[in-house]
Amino acid sequence: MSVHEQENHLSRKQKVLAFTLTLLTFVMGTSEFVIVGLLSEISSDLGIRLATAGTLVSGFAIAYAIGTPVLTAFLSRFPKYNIMIVLIILFIAGNVISAFAGTYAVLLLSRIATAMVSGVLTALAMSVAGDTMPTAKKPAVIASIFAGFTIANVLGVPLGTFIGQLSNWQVTFWVTALLGVVALLISLGVLPKDIKNEKSSIKDQAALFTQPRILLAFFIPIFGIAGTYTIYTYITPIIEDGLSIPSSYVSVVLLGYGAFSIFSNVLAGKIASRNGISRLRYVFVVQSVVLLSLYFTMASTIAGLISIMLIAVMIYAMNATIQLYLMNLAELYSPSAKDLASALTPVAVNVGIALGSAAGGIVVAAGSIAFLPWAGGFSALIAAGLASLSYGLDRKEARTRTESIPSE
């Protein structure tokens, strides 16, 4: 096989590695999201209010957003293979503790620990993919790793919820722990042991946040995800009250939403394959139009469902591009902080979820669910503006570099 063919094809070993990294994100995604379907059971069993049980979700997101960059910066100096194996073991332990938890406090602490471990594992999975995959195939592989979270929503969450409701919620965490053991056994033989680390201090890693270009790029996915979650947080009342669909069919609609979101990952890989950041300017404009369309289609069940499924198709379209973009910017401005840069997209996603949920709450409190599409569409337009600004700066810097090269 020629050098060109090697650069455009995955070897068998690389395919197995890509599958393993996707399996990891699927297992972590199932552990993260499945609790949403078990809140009522947990609330009843532990004798706490439903609102208190809901903090298990927000607590996970906050711990993920805060803990991931801090731990990634600290652990980046150690060999990736060793750290990933240890973190998978800690992930399994976190789920086992959740399964044994008899009080809200213990369950919350186990969820916080699991969140921070999951965040660093996700960042390292992205970093390993960036270090080992052919350049031409990186967008597709990165998109497939993100797809693990999507598949967790489509398959893992409904299955975990069914298991928890059929027996008890603790059994679901035993199942996620078992999935973690499967991922560990595969990872032991598949994860590369020879990836070189950039030796750097926490101070060097933290310097990443002093780079204006990286901060600008970091806020793009925050507003992109916030746009969707402004609506998605209240998807159940939108389905029931807005579209007049009976409660018994909500799970079917959500399953359809999850299935359509798989196409979003395919779209993400194609967008990222060539100058993705230039395309994102238009992707976010399209996302804004799709989000806003729900305002006009909510009065019709069929039209409203079409809008919701289109929202699902757009939700992850930016992921692969932003992940690669942040890693490339880190190569330019802070090479010693590549691993931390790998963590920024999942961190931004969790911040965006929190921002979108809060914005949606304000809109609902001030008016009604009918106005959520306006807030979501506006947030997506902000993301489009930030992507345009970042792309413009890229072009300006490229021209400056070209002009600085002396002519012969």
Image: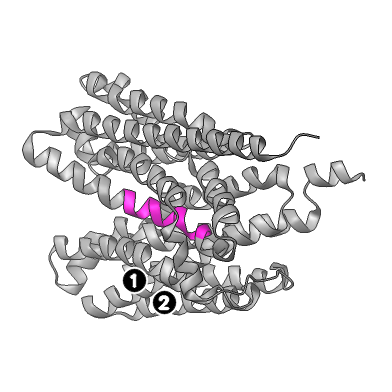
Image location (x, y in percent) of residue 229: 30, 42
Kindly identify the residue that appears in the image at 73 percent across and 53 percent down. 15
Q: Is residue 245 visible?
A: no
Tell which of 293 and 102 is nearer to you: 293
**Magenta run includes residue 140:** no
Using the rendered image of the protein, determine whether residue 34 is visible from the camera's viewpoint: yes
| Residue 343 among magenta residues | yes
Quadrant (top left, top right, bottom left, bottom right) of the C terminus: top right
Relative horizontal placement of residue 343, taking residue 378 as reference (left or right): right
Q: Earlier in the sequence, mark 1 or mark 2?
A: 2
Is the C-beta separation of discs 1 and 2 under 8 Å? yes
Specify few, some or many for label 2: CA neighbours under 10 Å numbering under 14, 14-19, or 20 or more: many
**Residue named by callout 1:** 111
Q: Main secondary structure of the magenta part?
A: helix
What residue do we see at 42% from left, 67% from top? 68
379 versus 190 height, above or below: above
Residue 270 position by quadrant:
top right
Identified at 45% across, 73% down, the residue is: 71
Figure check: 252 above or below 177: above
Helix or strand or loop: what does disc 1 sit on?
helix
Point out residue 131 in the picture as x, y percentages from the top left corner. Answer: 68, 59
Quick one: 35 or 394, which is closer to the camera? 394
State which region is magenta. 341-352
Determine the CA span between mark 1 and mark 2: 7 Å
Q: Mark 2 = which residue?
A: 94
375 relative to 118 in the view: left or right: left
In this rendering, the count of numbered labels is 2
Callout 2 amino acid: Gly
Q: Residues within 10 Å of mark 1 (few under 14, many from 20)?
A: many
Q: Helix or strand or loop: what does disc 2 sit on?
A: helix
